[in-house]
């Protein structure tokens, strides 16, 4: 039971970190993409 709970918590942490990474990447790259398009 403890292993399942630890695995679920690790999966949740990976999800949160990947979301933050995606947001950070968008913040960095949106101005460059915007300049290319317009």
Image (cartoon, helix red, strand yellow):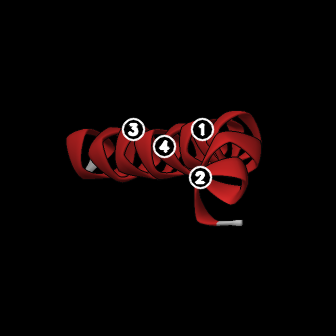
Foreground label between 4 and 1: 1
Choose the circle earlier in sequence order: 2 or 4: 4
How busy is the neighbourhood of tag 2: few (under 14 within 10 Å), some, or many (20 plus)? few
- Numbered disc 2: secondary structure: helix
State the quadrant of the C terminus.
bottom right
Between the residue at mark 3 and the residue at mark 2, the CA separation in whole angstroms equals: 38 Å
How busy is the neighbourhood of tag 1: few (under 14 within 10 Å), some, or many (20 plus)? few
Residue 36 vs 17, above or below: the answer is: below
> In x, y percent, where is residue 15?
46, 52
In the image, is 20 to the left or to the right of 18? right
Which mark identifies residue 18?
Answer: 4
In the image, is 15 to the left or to the right of 11? right
Foreground label between 3 and 2: 2
Mark 2 sits on what residue? 36
In the image, is 18 to the left or to the right of 34? left
Q: Which residue lies furthest to the front in this view?
A: 38
Which mark identifies residue 25?
Answer: 1
Mark 3 sits on what residue? 10
- Numbered disc 1: secondary structure: helix
> In x, y percent, where is residue 27?
76, 43
- Numbered disc 4: secondary structure: helix
Between the residue at mark 4 and the residue at mark 1, the CA separation in whole angstroms equals: 10 Å
- Numbered disc 3: secondary structure: helix
Between the residue at mark 3 and the residue at mark 1, the CA separation in whole angstroms equals: 22 Å
């Amino acid at each position: 039971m403890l292993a399942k709970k630890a695995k679920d918590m690790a999966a949740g942490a990976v999800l949160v970190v990947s979301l933050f990474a995606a947001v950070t990447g968008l913040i960095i790259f949106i101005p460059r993409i915007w300049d290319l398009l317009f």
